[in-house]
Image: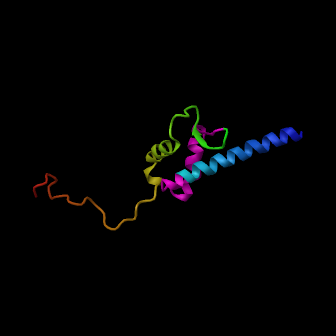
Amino acid sequence: PKVENADALAAENRSLKLNRVVQDMFAAQSVLADRREKLFTLHAGEFDLTADGKPMVKGKPEIDVAKHVAALVKGYPEWVRGTQAAGGGAAGAQKGGEGGG
């Protein structure tokens, strides 16, 4: 029973670590705090940890995890915090859309 319990705890620890690491990567991509868990849940099966505890794309160790995360986030633009930069709209747009006004 102790070995089974230890294995279960190790698996839970691994899962929590993967969850935290990937959600931190979502945060770095400006995913809204209340959407990170949902995004991870939707794509958890795509991630795993290497033997030394680093995140990887499951079955595709050659893929950069940060690039994979960025590609996933692009699919959910409504879940990403805007830049909150001043201004807005298309700078330099001209009346009529033909550039000649």
Residue 25 point in image, percent of width and height:
54, 51
Image quarter where the N terminus lies is top right
* Majority SS type along the magenta span: helix
| Residue 38 appears left or right of 97 | right
Q: Residue at x 45, y 43 (%)?
A: 71
Residue at the right extreme of this rendering: 1
Residue at the front extreme of this rendering: 52
Q: Residue at x 67, y 48 (%)?
A: 17
Residue 67 point in image, percent of width and height:
47, 43
Q: How is the image coloured?
A: rainbow
| Residue 95 appears left or right of 86 | left
Residue at the bottom extreme of this rendering: 86
Residue 20 versus residue 46 in the image, above or below = below
Occupied quadrant, residue 93: bottom left
Image quarter where the C terminus lies is bottom left
Occupied quadrant, residue 83: bottom left
Relative to the observer, which residue lies in front, 28 or 79? 28
Residue 32 versus residue 67 in the image, above or below = below
Q: Residue at x 74, y 41 (%)?
A: 11
Residue extent of the magenta highlight: 26-50
Residue 21 point in image, percent of width and height:
61, 50
Residue 12 point in image, percent of width and height:
73, 45
Occupied quadrant, residue 100: bottom left
| Residue 18 appears left or right of 79 | right
| Residue 6 appears left or right of 61 | right
Check if residue 35 falls in the magenta segment.
yes
Q: Residue at x 63, y 48 (%)?
A: 19
Check if residue 85 falls in the magenta segment.
no
Relative to the observer, which residue lies in front, 90 or 13? 13
